[in-house]
Image (tube, helix red, strand yellow):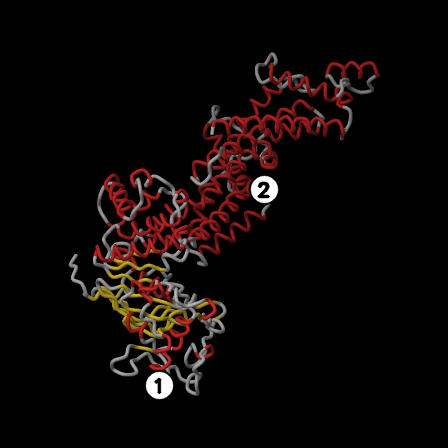
């Protein structure tokens, strides 16, 4: 097991390095303009441009910059470890920026995850148990709605109804929980629900289908033949087997959202990591983009590893060597 | 629990099971009646889809009551299991009536330890501590012949061989010393060498606990060795039902003849095996008259029109459902008579 984890960690490093390299390549192969032009002010002369390029390190070949980036990462910079360099635009520390933005995104994901797991799994279980009933059809109708409705539309409708009309929400923007807990909650509940909707719908359908499939297994019949209560049959025997694939999915979904909750973040103006990445991409601020991409890639890779390890504990048939 | 041999445990009368589907009603079991006494092994034979398993699931109350139409009576020690509330039935299931299923690979939960699953069966009907239940699980595993039961109880099912899993299933069934053990094709999924061991174990258990055993199988050899009475089923109906000795010495129904002709034995060469032509009918639309008539070599005028009732053609004979005259049944039956099968097998 230890050897397995070490090997996986090694491959995680390779994958993350590859992601960074690809980001570099994209930045250089598909330039949306010269970053230096952006910071040179109006009507810059060639000498100034050359100077800016030199200062940003843009006059070096991409692989030299890549090597420098990797080196800074491991050695660290004046803002500590891991060194992520400075933004092109403000010459501020990328690490600092990320640390400042990360809580917003992480709290958004955490709140939404709690909502979608609890509601998704319980709706799925009820649907499966009351199969073909009105409850089931209602729940699956909701699931279809949740899967089809785009987040930006849900978010805007939510804001219109619950903020403008009913005043139940604090509206857009972010309030730090250290500043005001009630303010934080009143601003966050709507983005939580909006982001959770899609996943809740998806998890409900997954849970329902997995559980229905499991309940058809022979070992469920054995459980019933033992004289166990229907509750125990479903929760202890049925859910145990149905939830393992959902645990896998959960790990990856969480990790993907670290860099991927952009739409929710922009609809609700939360300015988290997604906002940072998009902004960085639009202003050709390579270090910012790299910082977020690196964080997201590490999250996905580690989540993958975590899921595999957890899976081995959940399913005794899986053993890694 | 009183343990007088011969005490009538189970009395099934007119059991009928229908599954409504979008294609029509599946007539899975029709008007099946039989009984089981303490110390008796009832062999149930028939091809796949003959209603053997479904009738047992109905007795156990393991069919979804909402999606199945079940009628008739299943009398277990004076109580009708078919009308018993689900909660009451649950108290009997796994305690007084236990079941061993066909595929031990699929019947144990893959994510729980074997011992845990047996201990759970203990806890389902007994108010004892977990440690006590685990002890009982280990004791039973040891009893059914699992070596190193104490450590093997901590194994997961995938660490067990097929035969060991079936032994574990039997251990699980024995947890509360049931009155009836229903074994639904317990050896079909196992290696030939293991099959005999499992059958032997079931017989041992029957003698030791003095219980009634329903043994569903399509292996006539197993039936001939162990059963006291035999029920031959076809298309959800009983074709022939009587004491095992009589069925094998004087089979009365053409379907039973067909089964015997198609069964290999030591003295019969493969070339002499005669298969039953055709295949079992669809239970959505079973044939009129005798359900076996389209495949029967002896059919005559009444067969496609009128369904023969299940009764004894002469007082000394056992029950069959066939229009043939008693003389003909005796004549053709004698050609198949298997008296030495027990010795041969």
Q: Is residue B36 above or below residue A25?
A: below
When the figure is inspected, residue B131 is found, relative to residue A280, above or below; the finding is: below
- Mark 1 element type: loop
Looking at this view, name the residue that lies furthest to the bottom: B301
- Kindly identify the residue that appears in the image at 25 percent across and 61 percent down: B212
Asked if marks 1 and 2 fall on the same chain, the answer is: no
**Residue assigned mark 1:** B325
- Residue B64: image location, x then y, percent: 38, 61
Q: Quadrant of the N terminus of chain B?
A: bottom left
Marking on residue A94: none
Q: Crowding at label 2, few (<14), some or many (≥20) Cα neighbours within 10 Å?
A: many
Callout 2: helix, strand or loop? helix
Asked if residue B23 lies left or right of residue B144, the reply is: right
Q: Locate residue B319 relative to residue B288 in the image: left or right.
A: left
Depth order, front residue of B112/A320: A320
Residue A223 shown left or right of residue A170 in the figure: left
Q: Which residue is mark 2?
A: A151
């Amino acid at each position: 097991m230890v050897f397995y984890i070490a090997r996986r960690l090694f491959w995680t490093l390779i994958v993350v390095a590859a992601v960074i390299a690809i980001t570099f390549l994209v930045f250089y192969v598909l330039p949306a303009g010269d970053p230096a032009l952006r910071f040179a002010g109006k009507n810059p002369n060639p000498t100034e441009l050359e100077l800016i390029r030199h200062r940003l390190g843009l006059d070096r070949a991409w692989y030299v910059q890549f090597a420098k980036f990797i080196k800074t990462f491991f050695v660290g910079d004046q803002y500590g470890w891991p060194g992520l360099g400075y933004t092109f635009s403000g010459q501020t520390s990328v690490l600092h920026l990320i640390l400042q933005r990360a809580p917003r995104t992480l709290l958004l994901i955490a709140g939404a995850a709690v909502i979608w797991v609890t509601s998704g799994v319980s709706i799925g279980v009820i649907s499966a148990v009351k199969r073909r009933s009105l409850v089931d059809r209602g729940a699956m109708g909701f699931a279809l709605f949740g899967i089809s409705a785009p987040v930006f539309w849900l978010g805007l409708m939510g804001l219109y109804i619950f903020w403008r009309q009913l005043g139940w929400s604090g509206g857009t923007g972010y309030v730090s929980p250290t500043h005001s807990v009630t303010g934080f909650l009143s601003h966050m509940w709507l983005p939580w629900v909006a982001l959770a909707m899609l996943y809740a719908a998806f998890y409900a359908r997954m849970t329902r289908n997995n559980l229905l499939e499991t309940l058809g297994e022979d070992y469920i019949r054995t459980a019933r033949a033992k004289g166990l209560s229907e509750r125990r049959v479903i929760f202890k025997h049925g859910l145990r087997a149905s939830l393992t694939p959902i645990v896998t999915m959960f790990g990856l979904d969480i990790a993907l959202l670290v860099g991927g909750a952009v739409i929710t973040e922009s609809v609700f103006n939360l300015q988290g990591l997604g906002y940072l990445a998009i902004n960085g991409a639009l202003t050709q601020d390579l270090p910012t983009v790299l910082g977020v991409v690196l964080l997201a890639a590490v999250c996905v890779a580690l989540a993958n590893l975590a899921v595999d390890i957890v899976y081995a504990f959940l399913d005794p048939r899986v053993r890694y060597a | 629990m009183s343990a007088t041999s011969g005490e009538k445990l189970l009395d099934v009368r007119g059991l009928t099971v229908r599954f409504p589907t979008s294609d029509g009603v599946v007539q899975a079991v029709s008007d099946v009646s039989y009984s089981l006494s303490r110390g008796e092994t009832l062999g149930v034979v028939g091809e796949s889809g003959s209603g053997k398993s479904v009738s047992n699931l109905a007795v156990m109350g393991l069919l979804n009551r909402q999606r199945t139409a079940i009628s008739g009576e299943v009398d277990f020690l004076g109580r009708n299991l078919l009308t018993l509330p689900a909660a009451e039935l649950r108290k009997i299931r796994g305690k007084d009536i236990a079941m061993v299923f066909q595929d031990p690979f699929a019947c144990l939960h893959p994510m729980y330890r074997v011992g845990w699953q047996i201990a759970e069966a203990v806890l389902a009907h007994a108010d004892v501590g977990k440690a006590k239940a685990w002890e009982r699980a280990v004791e039973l595993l040891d009893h059914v012949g699992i070596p190193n039961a104490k450590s093997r109880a901590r194994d997961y099912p995938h660490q067990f061989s097929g035969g060991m899993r079936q032994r574990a299933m039997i251990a699980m069934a024995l947890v509360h010393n049931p009155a009836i053990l229903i074994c639904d094709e317990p050896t079909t999924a196992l290696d030939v060498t293991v099959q005999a061991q499992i059958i032997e174990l079931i017989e041992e258990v029957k003698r030791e606990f003095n219980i009634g055993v329903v043994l569903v199988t399509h292996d006539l050899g197993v039936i001939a060795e162990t059963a006291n009475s035999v029920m031959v089923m076809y298309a959800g109906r009983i074709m022939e039902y009587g004491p095992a000795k009589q069925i094998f010495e004087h089979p009365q129904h053409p379907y039973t003849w067909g089964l015997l002709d198609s069964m290999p034995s030591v003295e019969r060469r493969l070339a002499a095996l005669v298969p039953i032509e055709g295949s079992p009918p669809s239970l959505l639309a079973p044939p009129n008259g005798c359900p076996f008539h389209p495949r029967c070599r002896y059919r005559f005028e009444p067969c496609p029109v009128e369904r023969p009732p299940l009764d004894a053609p002469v007082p000394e004979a056992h029950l069959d459902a066939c229009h043939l005259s008693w003389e003909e049944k005796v004549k053709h039956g004698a050609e198949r008579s298997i008296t030495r099968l027990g010795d041969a097998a």
